[in-house]
Image (cartoon, rainbow, N blue to C red):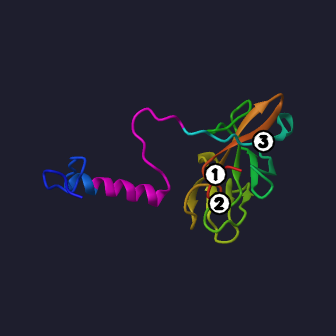
Amino acid sequence: MTDETGDNNSRGIRVSRRQLLSMGAVAGVAVGTGTIPVTGNAATPPTMAMPEVNVAPLDEIKAGSQRVFGYPDSQSPAILLRLDGPVEGGVGPDQSIVAYSMLCTHKGCPVGWNAEQKMLICPCHWSSFDPALKGRMIIGQGSQGLAQITLRVVDGGVNAVGVDGLIYGRQTNIL
């Protein structure tokens, strides 16, 4: 349908080629990522609360000890460690208690604690992760560091309350 100016746009809105290409690019990104870009004062998306799980009484976690538990569910093995000194993200009296997902970021094999090397090591392909450096991969085929379990001390116990990073094999940590 044409208007009185002979233009096919009946509202008289003109879009330049550059604007059209920009809109197409934004739409392509939105479709490709499953998100729609929002400008202005958009509300913050809701966050899902992770479960709070009691891992161990604080007085039972001695220096050099380890404890395996499931977090955020029983299909996700995690390991709690008490290291020699304070570390980033650590809790407890000397901030030396940390926890990580045990699923290697390469193929999902369960890592194990090697106290002599002070590393979490994957027995499948020997990727090694340093728990004193937020689970950073030191060597191996892993794609990134291990997901760190967020801990807090509550009523004399150490509780798991969240996850920093994506647990191997999941599209999201939300249950």
Provide the residue span drawn in magenta.
Answer: 22-44
> Left of 45 or right of it: where is 79?
right
Q: Secondary structure at mark 2?
A: loop
Q: Position of residue 150 (x, y in %)?
A: 68, 41
> Left of 61 or right of it: where is 124?
left
Q: Position of residue 136 (x, y in %)?
A: 58, 53
Q: Which residue is mark 2?
A: 168
Q: Residue at x 45, y 59 (%)?
A: 31
Q: Residue at x 83, y 28 (%)?
A: 155
What is the crowding at mark 1: few (fewer than 14 residues within 10 Å), some, or many (at least 20)? many
What is the crowding at mark 2: few (fewer than 14 residues within 10 Å), some, or many (at least 20)? many
**Please, what is the three-letter code of the amino acid marked with disc 2?**
Tyr
Q: Position of residue 118 (x, y in %)?
A: 68, 53
| Pointer 1 or 2: first along the chain | 1
Q: Position of residue 33 (x, y in %)?
A: 47, 57
Q: Is residue 34 or residue 111 the one in the foreground?
A: 34
Q: Residue furthest top?
A: 155
| Pointer 3 or 2: first along the chain | 3
The residues tagged by marks 3 and 2 sit, at their Cα atoms, a distance apart of 28 Å
Q: Residue at x 65, y 63 (%)?
A: 169
Q: Nearer the viewer, mark 3 or mark 2?
A: 2
Q: Which residue is mark 3?
A: 63
Q: Was residue 150 drawn as part of the magenta stretch in this picture?
A: no
> Left of 124 or right of it: where is 13?
left
| Pointer 3 or 1: first along the chain | 3
Q: Is residue 76 or residue 96 the one in the foreground?
A: 76
Quadrant position of the N terminus in the picture? bottom left
Q: Are marks 1 and 2 in contact (CB under 8 Å)?
A: yes
The residues tagged by marks 3 and 1 sit, at their Cα atoms, a distance apart of 22 Å
Up the image or down, 122 lies above or below 166; here it is: below
Q: Which residue is mark 1?
A: 147
The residues tagged by marks 1 and 2 sit, at their Cα atoms, a distance apart of 8 Å
